[in-house]
């Protein structure tokens, strides 16, 4: 590739990864065609107004933007108005409602105590299983850090439902996403910037893609036959699909949403989790509470259940189990050996990514492509 001519670049997928890279390449003077199999942009962040209630619905489940990365924060603010949003989650277990993430109030309510922070720390340390060295899985991680009672109340049932597996089969890293707090702080995230776009995520992604150097083709797959027409491909589709599943399929969990419609307020909060195994769903999201600056009479909630994704299902959560890992290694090696393609995003790299990380990685990937073009080295 040489600097003297504009490249023709194909971007597969119009989620944050694809859009951010397309924009950066287009701004550098290249011609970009974005292929998107769905009939809308924004991937699983897609939001749209419900025609009946006008509530902004997060079509593929709730997305809350949170970041400590100033470059990413400045980037999203360039393309839309971000409204401060402090995410707070409640959970219903054993017939009671508690606050998440597990904090001092959760602990005091569950154990019917009135402990202060230091007392609670000592109390939980006493509950924790100190015989566990380096936790090998989700359950060991939980037992080591919070003990059996908290684990069984808030994590065991929910995790079984969410992952369809015993927590002993799930990586410890999944639990590390959630803090255990010895204060009454019940913000779900700790990042300095926490927000939801005023006009939804789809409007932001549309604005990112709105550049004369970018053509977006909706309802259009990027096929192997299309590749020859481009100098470079950016693939944010499933990693295994690029290789025609030659080493087998990488597993995903998918989600089903059952809509609940009502007048007024159904939950009283944006997200209510359900920790009991007997309750078939994992959580309910009430979408109008993701836009507290708006007022709506009607309400739309999604009752969410999780299951193993079959062919044709929307992939949500990569299941990075041991057997997946063997297959994954083969794909990652194949991806490294492949030229003229950049693999990005949750599906393209088979990792569970928050939106801010997705954007940060997309900016870095675009820099990498531009750098290679400039220095005439292979991408
Ligand atoms: N989790 C749980 N109980 C809850 C919430 C979360 O056991 O009430 C576990 C579950 O295994 C989940 C993980 O903690 O996959 C991470 O939670 P997070 O809220 O980050 O999940 P997300 O919905 O973002 O995937």
Image: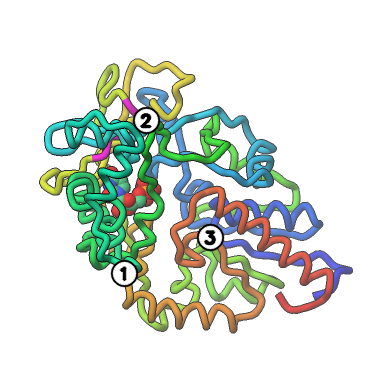
Going 48% across and 60% down the picture, which residue do you hit? Answer: 346
The numbered disc on residue 345 is 3
Between 45 and 4, which is closer to the camera in this rendering?
A: 45
Colour scheme in use? rainbow
Residue 333 vertical placement versus 303 (above, below): below
- Are the residues flagged by discs 3 and 1 in contact, CB closer than 8 Å? no
Q: Is residue 336 left or right of residue 246?
A: right
Residue 265 vertical placement versus 244 (above, below): above
Is the distance from the Cβ of mark 3 to the nearest ligand 1 atom less than 8 Å? no
Going 50% across and 46% down the picture, which residue do you hit? Answer: 40
Q: Give how far apart the Cα atoms at labels 3 and 2 are.
A: 35 Å
Q: Secondary structure at mark 3?
A: helix
Q: Along the polypeptide, which appears first: circle 2 or circle 1?
A: 1
Q: Secondary structure at mark 1?
A: loop
Q: Along the polypeptide, which appears first: circle 3 or circle 2?
A: 2
**Which of the 4 quarters of the picture holds residue 116?**
top left
- Are the residues flagged by discs 3 and 2 in contact, CB closer than 8 Å? no
The numbered disc on residue 184 is 2
**Which of the 4 quarters of the picture holds residue 272?**
top left
Q: Secondary structure at mark 2?
A: loop
Q: Tell me residue 185's x, y (percent).
A: 40, 32
Determine if the magenta segment contains residue 369.
no
Quadrant (top left/top right/bottom left/bottom right) for the C terminus: bottom right
Specify the segment rendered in magenta: 269-273
The residue pinned by badge 1 equals 136
Crowd band around label 2 with a 10 angstrom C-alpha radius: few (<14), some (14–19), many (20+): some
Q: Is residue 184 left or right of residue 97?
A: right
Q: Give how far apart the Cα atoms at labels 2 and 1 are.
A: 30 Å
The numbered disc on residue 318 is none
Crowd band around label 3 with a 10 angstrom C-alpha radius: few (<14), some (14–19), many (20+): many
């Amino acid at each position: 590739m040489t600097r003297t001519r504009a490249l023709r670049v194909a971007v597969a997928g119009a989620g944050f990864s694809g859009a951010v890279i397309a924009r950066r390449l287009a701004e550098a003077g290249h011609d970009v065609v974005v292929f998107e199999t769905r009939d809308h942009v924004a991937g699983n962040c897609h939001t749209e107004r419900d025609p009946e209630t006008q509530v902004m619905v997060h079509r593929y489940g709730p997305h809350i933007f949170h970041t400590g990365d100033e470059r990413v924060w400045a980037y999203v603010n360039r393309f839309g108005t971000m409204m401060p949003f402090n995410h707070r989650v409640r959970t219903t277990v054993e017939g009671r409602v508690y606050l998440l993430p597990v904090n001092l109030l959760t602990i005091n309510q569950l154990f019917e105590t009135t402990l202060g922070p230091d007392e609670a720390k000592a109390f939980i340390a006493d509950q924790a299983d100190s015989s566990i060295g380096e936790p090998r899985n989700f359950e060991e991680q939980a037992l080591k850090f919070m003990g059996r009672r908290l684990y069984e109340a808030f994590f065991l049932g929910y995790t079984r439902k969410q992952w369809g597996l015993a927590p002993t089969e799930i990586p410890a890293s999944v639990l590390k996403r959630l803090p255990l707090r010895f204060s009454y702080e019940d913000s779900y995230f700790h990042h300095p910037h926490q927000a939801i776009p005023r006009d939804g995520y789809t409007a932001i992604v549309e604005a990112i893609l709105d550049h004369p150097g970018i053509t977006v083709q909706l309802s259009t797959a990027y096929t192997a036959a299309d590749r020859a027409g481009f100098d470079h491909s950016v693939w944010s589709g499933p990693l295994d699909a690029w290789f025609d599943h030659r080493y087998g399929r990488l597993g995903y969990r998918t989600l089903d949403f059952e809509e609940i419609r009502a007048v007024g307020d159904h939950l009283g909060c944006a997200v209510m989790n359900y920790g009991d195994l007997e309750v078939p769903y994992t959580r309910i999201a009430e979408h109008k509470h993701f836009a507290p600056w708006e007022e709506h009479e009607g309400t739309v909630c999604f009752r969410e259940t999780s299951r193993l994704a079959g062919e044709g299902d929307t992939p949500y959560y990569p299941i990075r189990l041991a057997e997946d890992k063997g297959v994954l290694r083969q794909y990652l090696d194949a991806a490294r050996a492949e030229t003229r393609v950049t693999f990005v995003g949750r599906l393209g790299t088979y990792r569970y990514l928050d939106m801010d990380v997705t954007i940060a990685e997309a900016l870095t990937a675009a820099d990498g492509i531009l750098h290679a073009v400039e220095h005439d080295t292979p991408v």
